[in-house]
Amino acid sequence: MAFYSIKDLEKISGIKAHTIRIWERRYNLIEPQRTTTNIRYYDDEDLKRILNVSILNQNGYKISKIAQMDAGQLRERVIDLCLDTKNTDVQVESLLVAMLEMDEAKFTNVLTNSIIKQGFEATVESILFPFLDRIGILWQAGTINPAQEHFISNLIRQKLIVAIDNEMQNFIPKSDKKVVFFLPENELHEIGLLFYSLLARKEGFNVIYLGASVPVRDLKVVFDVRKADAMFTAFVSARKKEEIEEVLKEIEANVPAVPAFVTGLQIRELKPVLPKQFQVISDSQDFKSRLAGV
């Protein structure tokens, strides 16, 4: 069982610590425990309750009514809200709860419902990517358990691999053009890379998928063996802006003049200076349009 400070609850749920304290006093919504040195802390059950409360409160439920609900009633109301695929905030919050509970069935229900109603690609971009960005921020803040993050990331990874496998069953390349997909050294989060490699396959490109943490010297060998027409990479893990710029320069020096696409949380947040061959990818439609020019 994990232990959280009130600041941790604020970071994860988005509810201000001041508001949580008011809800504690006025509605007895959650009850903190205390260490032997009298420091307040919260457990997983408190965090899950606060997340569910946040979902309902953001969707018009008065806190006085929410406080009267038991855990089962809270869960039922949240599930009802999750059926509305237009409400992506609720779905992201629900995936957070699924992660904390390590509840594969809840995760699958939220995801499957969205895929049925808006398609696989739209679900990845509107729900999974914002969810993963949220996890990344919480990970950097040290407010989630590594086991929980690995649990949910591997579930998402499995879904993407199945989608890629299904795509390859009937894959017919539209040309002989090839795109290399890789993550730089110390980058381990493959989900975005897998998704964009799936899009490239759907567009009829041959994919050379290298995966995570690829040394630049190895990347050069790949291009020496297979004359690929473009490459794709991403930066998700916390780094300094200068470090990202150095990695990009190293890639440029070893694989010059090859069109390169880059995306990821750190690219969006830090906005590093890019070598001329690199283009930032904002979403799937942007990627598809840029692929057309390869």
Image (spheres, grey):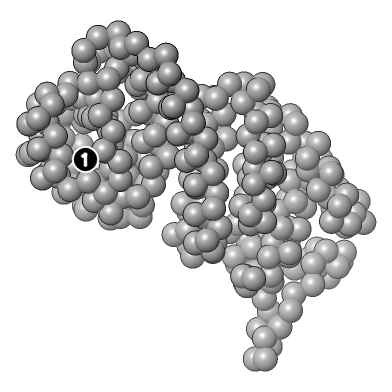
Q: Amino acid at mark 1?
A: Val
**Is residue 2 toward the left or the right of residue 220 in the image?**
right
Relative to 87, is 234 on the left or the right?
Answer: left
In x, y percent, where is residue 263? Answer: 34, 36
Where's residue 211, x and y in %? 30, 41
Q: Which residue extends farthest front?
A: 169
Q: Using residue 91 as the reference point, say whether residue 142 is left or right of it.
A: left
Q: On the rendered image, what quadrant is the N terminus found in?
A: bottom right
Classify residue 52 as left or right of residue 253. Answer: right
Q: Residue at x 51, y 51 (%)?
A: 135
Helix, strand or loop at disc 1? loop
Place residue 253 in its image quadrant: top left
Vertical position of residue 268 compared to residue 228: above or below: below
**Horizontal and vertical percent for residue 10?**
63, 60
What residue is rendered at 21% in x and 15% in y? Answer: 177
Residue found at the far bottom of this picture: 37
| Residue linked to disc 1 | 273
